[in-house]
Amino acid sequence: MSPSPATGEASRAAQQAAATQKLAAAHNIPLGILSICLAGLLFPVMGGFAKILGTEYSSLQVSWARAFGHILFMLAAFLPRHGLGMLRARRPGLQLLRSCGLFTSNLCHFYAITFIPIAKAAAISLTAPLIVALLAWPMLGERTTPVRLAALGLGFAGVLVVIRPGGEVFHWASLLVLLSAASYAMYQILTRKVAGIDSAETSAIYSSVIGAFGMLLVVPFVWRTPESWAHVGMFAGMGVLGAMGHYCVARALGYAPANIVSPFQYFQLLGSVAVGWLFFGDWPDAGTWIGGAVIVAAGLWLGVSQARRR
């Protein structure tokens, strides 16, 4: 006996409602923004630990410890619930490219902050969302508009104010932070590409594979045993904070487009100022504040314009 037209129509309506609910759950812009802001608060503390450790240990060892701790924390947190199935990536090539981008970003950043204040490095790092917006068109198909191009120009003008090339306060390590930001932008773009393919848990695990296991070939040559339990705690804490932060990033980019959530990483600047002052007694100079404000304004302008367009 075939179903009546009314029954078939009701079934189609129910299926459409279920699909709509699923789509709404997958695209939750406020939750994506909240997740990226939380990540922006976790990373400065991790950077403070890295700066302390970087004065006594190789940046390679610090970067490896951050990545290896990340892997251990993720496995302990998610393996009992999700099982070994979360280790299967549908796009392993993209996942490994993500991991390379993140490791390059961390290594450059950790080495740079041994020479320059955390807040200054954080201000320069805020160019990552702008670079994401620049790459979102060719890599994600998110069209570039005149407003976006103007915001990009404003943001990079802010970078010049922070770095002040040719001035007395210029330091070559600032260029390493720019390289770190570019690498992190690529990491975010690739995270967005795999967000609908692999789960956030899988992406969080794979993000540190290169740093955790690839660096095992190098770490024995630079290894220095931690001198105190405080250093052991900081080495371990970097992995936990980094893992939680990047899990939040993976969640955020799964909930909302990269060009909307990425500008809200400006919270990281405020956290970095607080960490720099509390840990090291550093307070940003006027140029860093002005340039950072210009970069943040560019990011916010970009995010608001894109939200209105959507």
Image (spheres, helix red, strand yellow):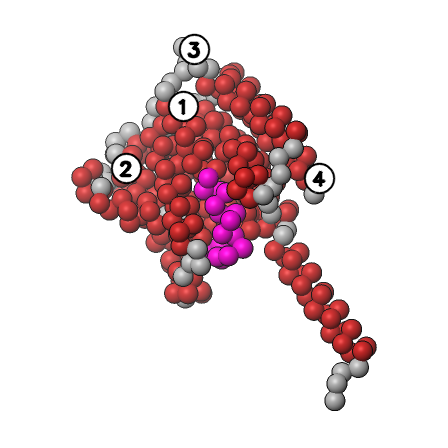
Q: Which residue type does callout 3 highlight? A: Gly
Around disc 1, counting alpha carbons within 10 Å, would you say few (fewer than 14), some (14 to 19), or many (20 or more)?
Answer: many
Residue type at mark 2?
Leu
Residue corresponding to mark 1? 174
Q: CA distance from mark 3 to mark 2?
A: 30 Å
Identify the residue under disc 3. 167
Sequence-earlier tag: 1 or 2: 2
Q: Name the spot of residue 10 as percent of width and height, x first.
A: 77, 73
Q: CA distance from mark 1 to mark 2?
A: 19 Å
- Mark 4 vs mark 3, foreground winner is 4
Up the image or down, 87 lies above or below 157; here it is below
Amino acid on which disc 4 is placed = Arg
Residue under label 4: 309
Q: Is 200 within the magenta?
A: yes
Furthest-right residue in this view: 6
- The numbered mark at residue 250 is none
Question: Which residue: 39% across, 36% down?
Answer: 105
Residue at the limit of the structure toward the left, as seen here: 221
In the image, what residue occupies the spot 68% across and 66% down?
A: 18
Look at the image and tell me in which quarter the C terminus lies.
top right
